Amino acid sequence: MRILLTNDDGIHAEGLAALERIAAKLSDDVWTCAPEYEQSGASRALTLAEPIRVRKVAARKFATTGTPTDCVMLAITELVEGAKPDLVLSGVNRGANVAEDVTMSGTVAGAIEGMALGVPSIALSQTWGPAPLDPSYESAEAFAPGIIRRLMEVGWPRDVILNLNFPTRPLDEIGEVEVTRQGFRDVQVRMAEKRTDLRGRDYYWMGFRQERSKPAEGTDLRALYEGRISVTPLHIDLTHMASVHDLKKVLGGPPPKA
């Protein structure tokens, strides 16, 4: 099996090293193409207004100045020699990618680009430990290979990616894998912190408050809160079908006049 790895935390990220160890348990044909610098929150951004530089880090390993989407597209269409990858793995992200965050995630976007190019794709993320600046990828490394192997055996729809999130707990306290749906927080955790530089000019740091919501049963958030591994099938069809049916009743036919 040929595997392509990417991420949004950058080519030097500890999570990418963890992903390389995960992939090594599944195959000896592993390629990597990741951003030269951190691209967290890049979503599906595609670099169109400037050139993308590619640096060969090692055999079958590249860094680019582009986004995760750029990386996957370039790897599959230009950099991987020979056959197209059989699987794209994106991550392991430093921090969970759940609920509404998945629409902003560069990790999820890397998997989406793989899917869009016809390759089964999985996003992997690891919740932070007790110290946010010192994450551990122990649970992802312990459980991801078996989960990925099983998923590849059974398969999933071509227009779907799988979003895996691993809790940070002692391994013997992680007893279950739960197939979940995407949740939505009932609290606003995104924030902008205003600061002032040494020249007296204001600037802002964007980030997240560590505040828990009250997620429903069966959601990705609830599974992580309760120490379970979350596996969520995602797709990029954003159509709200109930509204389609309702609006057809009032907007079907000739356009209304002003």
Image (cartoon, helix red, strand yellow):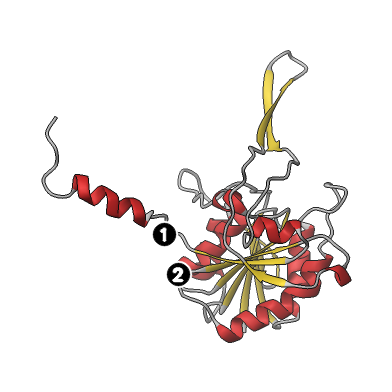
Residue marked by disc 2: 159
Direction from residue 28 to residue 77 in the image, left or right: left
Q: Is residue 144 above or below residue 185?
A: below
Residue marked by disc 1: 237
Do we see residue 64 in this rendering? Answer: no
Q: CA distance from mark 1 to mark 2?
A: 9 Å
Q: Amino acid at mark 2?
A: Asp
Circle 1: element type:
loop
Q: Position of residue 27 (x, y in %)?
A: 69, 83
Circle 2: element type:
loop
Label tally: 2
Neighbour tally class for label 2: few under 14, some 14-19, many 20 plus, Cα within 10 Å = some
Q: Position of residue 249 (x, y in %)?
A: 21, 49
Look at 62% across and 46% down and name the residue there: 185
Q: Nearer the viewer, residue 67 or 224?
A: 224
Q: Is residue 78 above or below residue 258?
A: below
Marker disc for residue 44: none
Q: Amino acid at mark 1?
A: Asp
